[in-house]
Image (cartoon, rainbow, N blue to C red):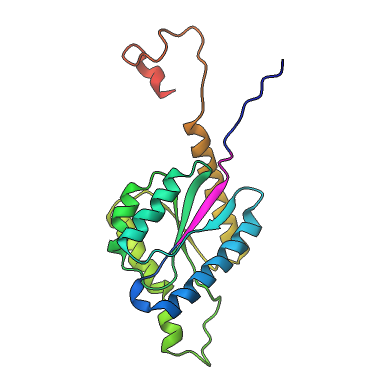
Amino acid sequence: MQLRIRRKKMSKLYFLVGSQDLYGAETLKQVAADNKKMAKFMDSKLKSIVRVEVLPTVITSDSCIEQIRKVNDDDDCVGVITWMHTFSPAKMWIKGLQRLQKPLLHLHTQANEKLPYATIDMDFMNLNQAAHGDREYGFILSRSRIPHEVVVGYYEHQSTIDAIARFARVAKAIAYSKSLRVAMFGNNMRDVAVTDGDRVES
């Protein structure tokens, strides 16, 4: 008789991007398209470690809570990558982030590698405010003492992908450790904490 142990996949990072509803439907449509493009690129580079899947854009406190619930409830998800495409008021992230139970990476990047100085206008500026949004978001993460990792760099650069890959490996290890079972021989009563002493820390 062969014993088969079914293991959880634990092989997904969600990509969660911030904006706000004041920008209007046209801007948010472009934000969603950029998010999908970036998630697809990261997925192609990280697929040997994890898959990267984009979630709907966070535009309100309620939408943030809704997406964080998806992250927490998905057993295949080991962590979340967050990025502020435009200016996303950071206070609307607080209630959602307080509920987050998985590793968090703040990716400080841009949709475009370089600014188009010859054609730049206010429409472009309104659509590409990651420098502003990420600084706002980074402040609230630190001020709220929410554990997180930060990666800075253009998302297509290999150094940035390497840093995200390191986070992904650690996130997978954390997820695995939460379902790890360890046998200890010569111990006392099973699951009794008060007599375990320092062995609980092992």
Vertical placement of residue 161 versus 100, above or below:
below
Q: Nearer the viewer, residue 85 or 198?
A: 85
- Of all residues, the one furthest to the right in this rendering is 1
Q: Position of residue 120 (x, y in %)?
A: 48, 89
Q: Where on the picture, by quarter, is residue 159?
A: bottom right
In this orientation, which residue lies closer to the viewer: 13 or 132?
13
Q: Residue at x 39, y 44 (%)?
A: 101
Main SS, magenta region, reads strand
Residue 113 forms part of the magenta stretch: no
Question: In the displayed structure, would residue 173 be above or below residue 165?
Answer: above
Q: Which residues are magenta?
A: 9-16
Circle count: 0
- Measured as percent of width and height from the top left, residue 46 is found at 62, 54
Q: Is residue 158 visible?
A: yes
Extreme-front residue of the structure? 25
Give x and y (percent) for residue 100.
Answer: 37, 48
At 59% from the left and 40% from the top, the residue drawn is 9
* Residue 89 at x, y percent in the picture: 31, 68
The furthest residue to the bottom: 118
Q: Quadrant of the N terminus?
A: top right
Q: Residue at x 36, y 60 (%)?
A: 63
4 lies above or below 184: below
For residue 159, say whether it is visible: no
Q: Residue placed at 62% from the left, 26% from the top?
A: 5
- Which part of the image, by quadrant, shows the C terminus? top left
Q: Is residue 59 left or right of residue 111?
A: left
